[in-house]
Image: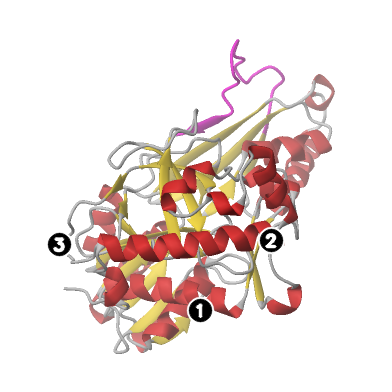
Amino acid sequence: MSGYYREDIERASYETMRKLQDERLVTSVRHAYDNIAYYREKMRETGVEPGDVRSTDDLFKLPFLSKDDLRDAYPYGFLALPLSECVRIQSTSGTTGKRVVAFYTQHDIDVWDECCARAIRAAGGSNEDVIHVSYGYGLFTGGPGLNGGSHKVGALTLPMSSGNTDRQIQFMVDLGSTILCCTPSYAAFLAENIHSMGVRDQIKLKAGIFGAEAWSEEMRCDIEKSLGIKAYDIYGLTEISGPGVSFECSDQTGMHINEDHFLPEIIDPDTGKVLPYGEKGELVFSCITKEAFPLLRYRTRDICVLSRAECSCGRTLVKMSKPMGRSDDMLIIRGVNVFPSQIETVLMNAGYPANYQILVDRVNHTDTFEVQVEMTPEMFSDEVKELSEREDELLASMRNMLGISPKVTLVNPKSIARSEGKAVRVIDKRKV
């Protein structure tokens, strides 16, 4: 049985948790209203004042926030404290190239680290482990989150970041890594290389904590078999804090939400109506302990189900299912958020017509990503060398916009199928 990092919280009664949530929500609403002009105006437009929110029963009265709000208020519009009290930012891409910038006080970092520590303990981690963190570091939240959680647990932390697979495996063997933290696709890639190098018997891994991209139960089974581990899911988003918003336990029937910090709701994505436990809808979070960036009723656009069914691990924290899709057009490719609108912005800025198609697939557990772009008749007459140069220029622009490199293919004029209704911009063949 996996352990607990905060047993008093992770196994709290419903009544105890509800009382804590009520107190923290009331404080957070007042904090956001008093310190964020953008949010104060949204509340006034909705006809709500802080005094109207006395408990979680009143949460529905608050307006929703979306990524569009964060973009409109970029970069400091949702900052609730002076910069002098903030110690870090993390960031992810936005819909039109404007990045989402999340701010953290030291208290916010400590909370985030503890949430990730809970995930590590649920996966069987302790101060006896060597935790191998192969998520990206820097602005991406994956590396910093699991790194901080590993420190909280007291484990030996290997801050490997992503890439340089030969060195990853060398350290894994030489230092006896026991828990691997990375995207599931990179875990599968590492497994292939470990087998091809003939060092499978020298690997001491017992568990993996994988997130940042969608993955199927079949992929879980393949990774567990090839690495001889138990593979755990973890969920988060930069706007809320990063990985550790929720985590899987040994029961593996959903992810426990750290609901003492992140208050979840499920809504109908079309009407905004709050749905009961067990119904599928869009996941919404309210941050009830954040100091620097206290988002309330933030629409994640992830479709899932909440459940309070009893869990064999003993935790009473509410569970969320794996996301079953999106209520917007965002794609997650190799752990990176990609919006078709970003690609359209690149094309329009470069003088191309907005006739394009995004092709996504998964080959050998790794996402493939191609953007096909229609040429104009004038471009079609260019020489092969000039077309290659155009593709390279578009690739560079898309890499700068997206933070990921697609394959860019220029295709003949009018060769992409037209639709009388909404254009089919994305063909996603991944089975997740």
Q: Is residue 291 left or right of residue 327?
A: right
Q: Is residue 274 left or right of residue 292?
A: left
- Which residue is farthest top? 420
Residue toward you, 299 or 180: 299
Tag 2 residue:
34
Image coordinates of residue 297 in percent, x first then y, are 53, 48
Residue toward you, 112 or 414: 112
Q: CA distance from mark 3 to mark 1?
A: 28 Å
Residue 416 colored in magenta in the image: yes
Residue 200 seen in render: yes
Residue at (18, 66) in percent of width and height: 313
Q: CA distance from mark 2 to mark 1?
A: 24 Å
Amino acid, disc 3: Ser
Few, some or many C-alpha atoms within 10 Å of disc 1 (few <14, some 14-19, many ≥20)?
some
Amino acid, disc 1: Asp
Figure quadrant of residue 282: top left
Callout 1: SS: helix
Q: CA distance from mark 3 to mark 2?
A: 42 Å
Image coordinates of residue 351 in percent, x first then y, are 84, 32
Tag 1 residue:
110
Q: Which residues are magenta?
A: 410-428
Sequence-first tag of 3 and 2: 2
Point out which mark residue 312 bears.
3
Callout 3: SS: loop
Amino acid, disc 2: Asp
Sequence-first tag of 2 and 1: 2
